[in-house]
Amino acid sequence: MKVLVIGGGGREHALVWRLKESSRVDRVVCAPGNGGILAEAECVAAEAGDVGGLVALAERLGPDLTVVGPELPLVRGIADEFSKRNWRIVGPTKRAAQIEGSKIFAKEFLRRHNIPTAELYGCYDSPGDAYSALCAVDWPVVIKADGLCAGKGVFVGPNPDKATAFIERVMEKNELGPGGRRVLLEEALEGEELTFIVVTDGERYAPLVPTRDHKRVFDGNQGPNTGGMGAFSSDDLLPPGLRQIIISNIVEPTLRGFAAEGIRYQGFLYIGLMLTLSGPKVLEFNCRLGDPEAQAIAARMDFDLAEILNDLAAGQLVPAKLRWKPGASVCVVLASGGYPGNFKSGKRIEGLTGAGQINGVKILHAGTKRQNDSLLTSGGRVLGVTASGPTLEAAVGAAYETVGKIHFEGMHFRKDIGTGAGRRIAVGD
């Protein structure tokens, strides 16, 4: 098989890593890829949001299977274009991808199908209406921009002044672009977050191992939200009874809801949950694998990913084929100085050769580029040091031992990934 992977971050490096291991795969092409992926697969220039350009690329390459990493091409309809041409692709249609592309669509979907979620105060098209609505909410309040905002569209407003300032930035100053034209207000949930991802061919589904993301930039869940500073996976995260509740009350009603609305959802379905005292509730949906959750999940795979995804794209998923390594895994993100705000790129990365020799560790690249014989930073999240082990403590130890060998100017990371973050108010991405 020839496989095309669309995207260029840590999630895509994780996909390339596992796809390359398949005896069924003899060629992997990544568009656009990054400096680390380049060492394992062919990389070709591409814009992830340019559906027409990606269709032309696929016409030229003729892949047997295409796997889409990021949400933008899915929300813009790449799966529809590939399906028109009878090309196998892993990812939902444009209509189905609204579950991530519009938080208002997702919220209304949850309410239509009686799926547990935070209470909705209202959806607003004008800043004036949104400001007025703040008079009748409980504090803190969660404010969500409706569209895609690169992880910056959600804010927990602790008081009216800060909530008003966020609405002004999003709706009047247009700081988040078209994704901020509409907002919704909802209650803030308290508890522990859990990421529950399933793969589905539209009829059958299979859960992936559970993960927990660490979104805040600083230790102890302090500072602004990021795309994710690390994630871990352990079977201890999800007792069997709670797993069944999530499947019965959230996963299966969601898939039935798609079917009832004439939506055949195919691909990865990310369900961000809050484990509240009254049970698990949905914070958000994503129409793709999470990042850095994908890295932690890939580290525990004990199956042929290419076989599973090819079956899925053909509408023939066999859930029993998904097997998992026991124990745990962790991914620690190394970020550029200033991230998630302004940061400088082009910093030389040192120590990767020695770091790559620690047993059970895989260094997955997110924002890197090659320049002659050097590897340079090229993004906010630069590397995902990913480790697996018989216990969470062993995986965490191996990851941080590796982190200690790597250096680039301004490098920063959280030191508490995999420790469990305790109870907190959280809202997803």
Image (cartoon, grey):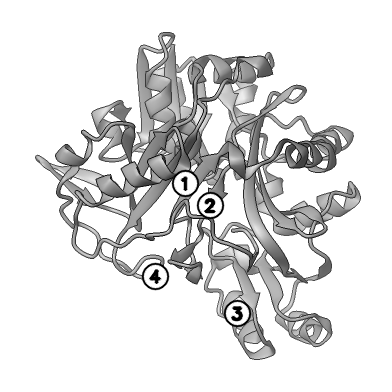
The x, y position of residue 51, in whole percent, is 52, 38
Any mark on residue 213, and which?
Answer: 2
Any mark on residue 74, and which?
Answer: none
Any mark on residue 292, and which?
Answer: 1
What is the C-alpha distance between the residues marked 4 and 2? 20 Å
Q: Secondary structure at mark 2?
A: strand
Task: Name the N-terminal-most of marks 1 and 3.
Answer: 3
The x, y position of residue 397, in whole percent, is 34, 46
Which amino acid type is marked by label 3? Answer: Phe
**Other-residue count near label 1 (Cα within 10 Å), few / some / many at <14 / 14–19 / ≥20:** many
Any mark on residue 166, and which?
Answer: 3
Q: Is residue 338 visible?
A: yes
Which amino acid type is marked by label 4? Answer: Gly
Task: Tell whether label 1 touches label 2 (CB within 8 Å).
Answer: yes
Q: Secondary structure at mark 4?
A: loop
Q: Which residue is mark 4?
A: 341
Horizontal arrangement in the rendering, residue 244 relative to residue 305 (left or right): right
What is the C-alpha distance between the residues marked 1 and 3? 26 Å
Task: Name the N-terminal-most of marks 2 and 1.
Answer: 2
What is the C-alpha distance between the residues marked 2 and 1? 7 Å
Q: Nearer the viewer, residue 42 or 382?
A: 382
